[in-house]
Amino acid sequence: MTLFFQQLISGLAIGFVYAGLALALSVVYEGAGILNFAQGEMATVSAYLAWVMTARGVTFWLAFPIVIAISLVFGLVVQRLFIRPLERASEQELLMVTLALYLGINAIVGWSAGYLQKTVANPFGFQVWIVQGTFITSQQVGAAAVLLGVLLLVGVLFQRTSIGLRIRAAAQNPESSRLLGISVGWMLALGWGIAAAVGAAAGMMAAPTIGLQPDMMGPVLLLSFAAAALGGFGSRIGAVVGGLVIGVASSLSAQYIDLLAGDLNQIVPFAVILVVLLFRPQGLFGRASALRV
Amino acid sequence: MNAARLPVRGNARTSSRDAAWLAGRGIFAICICLAVVAPFVVSGYTVFQFTRILCIGIAVLSINLLLGYSGQVSIGHSAIFGLGAYTTAILVHRASVPYGLAILAGGALAFAAGFLLGLPALRIRGLYLGLLTLGIAVLFPTIVAHFRGLTGGPFGISIRTPSAPFGIDLGAGKWLYFLSLATLLVFVGGFHGIVRGRIGRALGALRKSEAMAAALGVGLARTKTLIFAISAGMAGIGGGLYQLLIGTATPATYTLTLSLAFLVASVVGGLRSSWGAIAGAAFVVYVPDKTASLGSTAPQLVYAIALAAVIYFLPGGVAALPPRLLGMWRSKRPRHALQLQQRGGE
Amino acid sequence: MTASSFRRPRSLALALLAGVLVVAASSASAATDANPRGISKNQIIIGGSFPFSGPLAAYGALSEGAKAYFSWVNANGGVNGRKIKYVTLDDGYDPSRLASNARSLIEQQSAFLLLDFGGPANAIRDYMQQVNAIQMNMSGLHDEARYTLTRSWWPDIRWEAGIGAAWALKNVSSPKVGLIALNNDLAIDFAAGINRGLGSSKSLFVSTLTVSPAQVDVSSQLNRLRAEGVNTLFLGIGGATVVGALKYIRQTGWKPTIFVYSASLAIRGILDQVGDIENLYSAMWLKDPADPRWAKDAGVNAYKARVAKYASSADPNNIFVENGYAGAVALVAVLKKVKNPTTASVLKAWNTLMPTVNPLLMPNIKLSRGPQGRIVHQYQIVKFTNGSYKPVGNVVTIKG
């Protein structure tokens, strides 16, 4: 049973990273109706930004909010520059644009930072707690706590504040929102900004564990796609739950299903996607009516 | 290229179109002549590169059929291409099957795989299909590397590039070039047949509105699945030829990166054009070679810029460039024909 | 149809004209040489294809190191009077791009021999045999018996794993061995090597977990091995994953004896992130340039100075830069033994190399002919302590 909890903790710890990126994906999805393939790369940029600042002597906890703020602006700018001109474009075109962003950002990061992994300090130190024989590291707890805080903050922002309500209104019903005097374009851009900020938090929290290099978020993005599909695209709570479930499912299957213990563990998230698609295409938390045919 | 249209032309307005059609035909003839002469005058390396373009061109053409005409996104064509390649390699290497038969078997297997993939695609929107095929692309190398007994695992499986049959005096490289060229031409013919025929009309209705097409009695399910299967079959045969060319199939060849290259080629070349597919294939084969001196990440950056440039400034890709430059057709054609894709579900 | 036949002569004429143009253009580039390809009186052309982009782009640094040494050689008289022209292309770790690069380098650039890296090199071995050109793989490949023109720079992974396992058998009390390795040749070779090293005690090798390169977090695999009672852990995973794995091991207070694959281990970029970790071993053959132990080492300092001069964009503390540099030193040492280089004579010089000092190899390790055509076949077991590798025991030599 100890081992079960140990694997649960491992799964949850990485699951929070998936949840963060999946939440970013779902915020963008709500506004633009697409999955942003560049979401992971945008988070990578943020993680590098944090590294640049800490390498110049800024403490991590000062760099963290600054990077979040810069990332918010970055997301906003990306939307205004690249997505807004294609307002009337098809899903496929938007998908291709995010692919272009993915390739472009990845190339620029690789070109400017090189491919050698950078040294990132553990912002939470190297402590460990042992609860009934289960090891919980300070890095796991700290990263999870920060990400949970960010996720809650985003939840409050969208549910309880007027700006959040306006973003949602702009995303869900642009025509009526326009009549109500909401600046739909800017609200959608703000959605991208918030997504980038959440992704930035996920990237900065993941970097000490998965290593800071240009392709760090590629595998994470795939798992976050699975998380978003599981939760139901556009559902924020679904994305978070989906991320945690994917993290835990990967971890537990590696322990208890021998076939999936090794390299075939990669099948788990995609098996989840397939099952969701076949049996509950709207995802766990999505509304069936959201499915357009 | 579109002979079927010719006899119905009667009025004065079409005379300029006839001229354009003839010019198109002339260019096509020139291209064929050049393609036939080329391997005898260029170096072995260039023949190799040309053959790569042809094989990748087949895959890109299959993407065009799928994405350009049925609006379905596949990020998994690297895996389907790889399925054709591995089937060919395994049959030739382990069972000494003649390579022609092995390639066809690879195509058939890919067709079946595409059919299976197309089944859930019926229930789901483009986004989900994108995810599902993305999963296939990511998992393929892992699965291939895992089942070592069959696939040779990470070391791959090697076969030799075959030499020409019937004592034809051609080097192996040239023979494979002509084999690929002939296959591509057959597929181009098939592509136009499909696009202009009954399936094409059904797809046209489908693209405008799935709901409307369904109301009109177009067999939505059957058509979409069939197109997916045909596209996969084409890609599988392209993969088989590619395997003969490269010689060794390794898991690292058929990764997500290859799928992304196919998509870039498809969009840059022009989603709804057959020669655009070849132009796109040439783009992804030559860009890494020609831009590498600018820096290691330059090719990827060029991909990104080209992709974005086409979407923002050149809907229809490179294939739309000549008519644009010449100012032909452009004014007479409905605008949406040049666009990447009509927005569905409206 | 009448209209089209009317136009056809013109299109045919155009086709012929274009054909003539192509002939004219291509005949200009047709190569003629009496010497072996790539060798002239004052030049030797070496081609290189490496992953400069893509997920394994970190290994492109090997080529930068090699380039720095070639430049230094050129500035100091060249190889028996011949200057090295080093031409590189990026393959992104994609076998089909390597296949294309190999043809380009051999046929277009007339390279005499080829340097490449990693598993994709399997895809061009047949081609290299066909064109009778030497392929020097900067990592390690197999099957030197069948592919007589393929030579590896890195020693066989199985040797390294075997040495580690044999050492653990002697020095760890009641060892229980577990392995986490990438699902490529690493996993296969590591497992084979461990089994060989354990000899008749194979039953001590309790668990192998392979992971895909996309697996960013191996903590659940580590939990599993720990729960199985593993106390001797072999890690054959990529550098990025090694960092996460070692950090997790350190944090959870697990203290197994750890052997890390030498090519995934470096002070710069890996161990400097992990900090103090106990019982970390490796079987190494190259001095880590970031190791303070070699701060006053003449060979390492000369290397750093030359990299600073000839490859200013490269980080001399990056072990892959050094690794590629050392490989180039070895290659030049072989080429210098031959007055008139041909594929056969260079290969013979490689295969009969007498013990040669390479200033970047660990003390008491020399290059020389060895089993499987490898010229590196000696190791020094090291333990990582206080930011430095401390040698443990004597140099181990593999006998074929």
Image (tube, coloured by chain):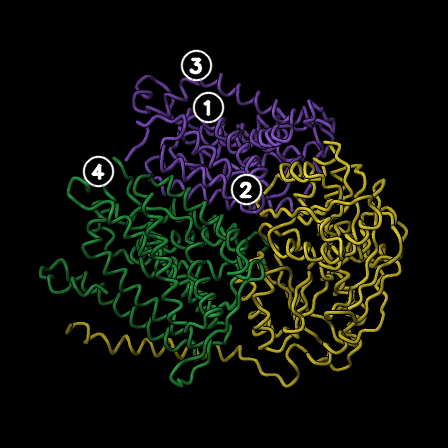
Chain colours: A purple, B green, C yellow
> Where is mark 3, residue-wise?
A162
Q: Which mark is residue A163?
A: none
Q: Is residue B149 visible?
A: yes
- Which residue is painted at 28% across and 74% down in the image? C11
- Give how far across and how far down residue B25 sits, in percent: 25, 68
> Where is mark 1, residue-wise?
A237
Report if the CB atoms under discs 2 and 1 are less than 8 Å apart.
no
Dots 2 and 3 on the same chain: yes
- Which residue is painted at 37% across and 64% down in the image? B105
Q: How far apart are labels 3 and 1 at the CA level?
A: 19 Å
- Which residue is painted at 36% across and 38% down in the image? A278
The chain letter for the residue carrying disc 1 is A
Q: How many marks?
A: 4
| Callout 2 crowding tier (Cα within 10 Å): few <14, some 14–19, many ≥20 | some
Q: How far apart are labels 4 and 3 at the CA level?
A: 37 Å
- Give how far across and how far down residue B190 sits, in percent: 27, 62
| Callout 4 crowding tier (Cα within 10 Å): few <14, some 14–19, many ≥20 | some
Q: How far apart are labels 2 and 4 at the CA level?
A: 36 Å
Which amino acid, mark 4? Ala
Closer-to-camera residue (C314/C217):
C217
Q: How far apart are labels 2 and 3 at the CA level?
A: 35 Å
Which amino acid, mark 3? Ser
> Where is mark 2, residue-wise?
A219
Closer-to-camera residue (C138/A270):
A270
Q: Which mark is residue B211?
A: 4
The chain letter for the residue carrying disc 2 is A
Q: How far apart are labels 4 and 1 at the CA level?
A: 31 Å
